[in-house]
Image (cartoon, coloured by chain):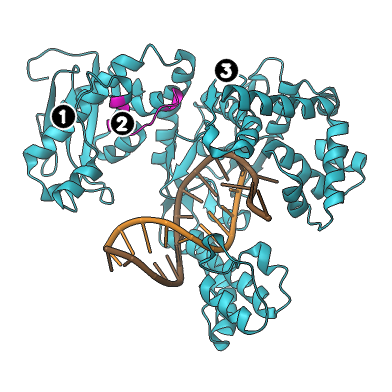
Chain colours: A cyan, B orange, C brown
Amino acid sequence: MPDGSSPRRIAIDVETVSLKDRTPIGLSVATSSREALYFPLWNEDNQDVPWDLIRDDGVTKIYHNCLFDLMVLKPYKPSANNIADTLVMAHLLNMDGELSNLVWWVDPYHAKPCRSAKAMLELAGASTMLDLPQDEVAIKCCQDTIATMWVYERLKDKVDRGYFEVEMALIPILHRMSLRGIAIDQEERAALEEELTDEMLYYRNLAEAEGFNPGSPKQVGYILAKRGTFLPFSQGHKQLKTDVKVLEKVLDPLASMVLQYRHYQKALGTYVIPLRGAERAYTRFHLDAATGRISSTERNLQNIPPQIRSMFLPDSGTFTDADFSQIELRILAYMSGDREMQYIFESGGSIHQATAEFMNIPYKRAKNVGFGMIYGATVETVMETAKTNDKRLAQRFIEDWSRKYRDAWNWIQFQQEQGLLNGKVHTLFGREFVLVQEEGEGAVRRKSVNYPIQGSAAEIFKRALIMCKHLDLANQLHDEVLIDGDVELPVGLDHIVPDLLTPVTLKKTARWT
DNA sequence: TCGGAAGGCCC
DNA sequence: GTACGGGCCTTCCGAT
């Protein structure tokens, strides 16, 4: 810093041109909750910026949403180690993450002033930060770092250290994954594009010959009605519902034409065309999901359809894909102490297979019923997923399931009661989730069951990622990690919770599958 | 030009 | 007669 001292702890905030244009225009560094400096960045590198601190692994660097700022600062190579993130802290404490609200929540009487960039732009009627006077931007940026430091000081002893350490250990791992990206096989991509475009055009032309745009739900509803099929109303009664579930049941060939078109258009528009000419696909990760899962944004790499995955290549020639096998059901078995489930898992069997045999139904139905239980399904939704119109049959599925897995069933009931009574539920590692009673009894019941299961799975998976940090991680998908290289997995991955076996399935391939 | 609604992909 | 948990993104279309 200018005065020559070297703080152990700084708060950092970066201002960008706008929310859309992430070119950094300046950054602020706070050394305490009382002083901060602003450094313009937009022209040549500002020599005054304390890059040595920002790049120093030994300095604790406090950000509010560090994965965003680290990405914006990418050309300046900021350190991703030894980070403290107040946004992550807020989420761990079930608080609103927006900084200006957070400041208020932490201590309304001594709250530090701060504004969101969005509010500031709206107030000034400006579209980018460059339209604002530089000193205003500087003040805003300094206010943010001061507020960030201030929030950090007040929350650091409130947040559970164990959880926070896990989250912060993930930061360099996730940041590195974002930076590396995944190689795209442009030949394969182009082949997919050609193939899918042919199909898409075929169905679009058919639809246009009938005088409607198959991409418009409104027109689809209108034309089907004109031809004698009347669809149910959508939410709000503004339109007719034309989703897969509805159109599948429609006999008019136009319906399946629309579904075909949508299928190919979806693949093209979301996954294939946006990667035209790209050497690699990059994403950013977030740590703000309600259940503690990691999400992927600005090119979601967690929802790529299997048919499209072949265009992603390993740099090394081999992907090692490690997948936690049926981890949520194993967690259910463990948390509920269900002896039947545990027995099936211990003897190396498949739960869905066992369910199917017991209930005398196909594997797929058994699987749907099982997942329905984890998600807190009602009879009606079991009817839908199991594809039956017979309500009594669906009722039977649930009853049979509850008889076979009695302890799990009882645990599910118990969770629901607890959630309704206490307004909160807990994971295996003790993380607490607050349930919003205003969302209604049904929602609270479902989340009371699902949050502990999904949340515990996320906790196990995060620890697995940390155990794999020395490997070249290319992607992560909730219970699956894609590693670039033909590698061995670390020992102990299947015993992250000592007495819960979580087997990992390995797959080595020449491209993603 | 923005933003909500509708639809659809993943675990 | 009401939504089965958690995500993200694209398209259409009406409002501004």
* Type of amino acid under label 3: Gly
Residue at 33% across, 24% down: A105
Quarter placement of the N terminus of chain A: top left
A126, above or below A243, in the image: above
| Residue to which mark 2 is pinned | A101
2 vs 1, front mark: 2
Range drawn in magenta: A91-104
Mark 3 vs mark 2: which is more N-terminal? 2
Which residue bears the numbered disc 3? A430
Secondary structure of the residue carrying tag 1 is helix
- Identify the amino acid type marked 2: Asn
Residue with the mark numbered 1: A142
Residue A439 x %, y %: 54, 38
- Dot 3 falls on which chain? A
How far, Cα to Cα, is label 2 from label 1?
17 Å
Residue depicted at 68% across the width and 32% down the height: A328
Find residue A400 and report its horizontal and vertical position in percent: 88, 38
Residue A323 in the magenta stretch? The answer is: no
